[in-house]
Amino acid sequence: MATLRIEATRDEATGLFFLSVFLPAESTEPFVTTAPRYMSAAAAEQDMIATIAATASRPR
């Protein structure tokens, strides 16, 4: 089973945080990144968890 890694990083230009998703987890380059829009790393991580949970809960 493939694993992924999610990292929250502070954008120096804006002071906001963005997320990088690495797939597979040991990749050196992110698969996808978000725009810097989060006030904290915790807020970014919670948003990603909520997004994954909502997507996984949708009927197929």
Image (tube, rainbow, N blue to C red):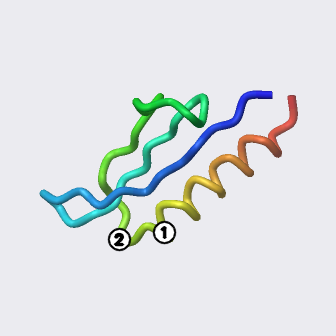
CB under 8 Å between discs 1 and 2: yes
Q: Residue furthest left?
A: 13
Assess disc 1: are there few (<14), some (14-19) or many (≥20) residues with their C-alpha within 10 Å of its C-alpha: some
Quarter in which the N terminus is drawn: top right
Local secondary structure at mark 1: helix
Q: Residue furthest right?
A: 59
Q: Which residue is mark 1?
A: 43
| Residue at mark 1 to residue at mark 2: CA–CA distance | 7 Å
Could you tell me which residue is drawn at 50 percent across and 70 percent down? 42
Rendered view: 6 above or below 31: below
Label at residue 6: none
Local secondary structure at mark 2: loop
Could you tell me which residue is drawn at 40 percent across and 30 percent down? 29
Viewer-proximal residue among 12 and 55: 12
Quarter in which the C terminus is drawn: top right
- Image location of residue 4, percent across then percent down: 63, 38
Rendered view: 1 above or below 16: above
Give the residue type that dot 2 points to. Met
In the visual, does 55 lie left or right of 10?
Answer: right
Viewer-proximal residue among 46 and 28: 28
Q: How many marks?
A: 2
Rendered view: 18 above or below 23: below
In the visual, does 46 lie left or right of 57?
Answer: left
Viewer-proximal residue among 10 and 54: 10
Could you tell me which residue is drawn at 57 percent across and 30 percent down? 23
Assess disc 2: are there few (<14), some (14-19) or many (≥20) residues with their C-alpha within 10 Å of its C-alpha: few
- Image location of residue 3, percent across then percent down: 70, 35
Q: Which residue is mark 2?
A: 39
- Image location of residue 39, percent across then percent down: 35, 71
Give the residue type that dot 1 points to. Ala
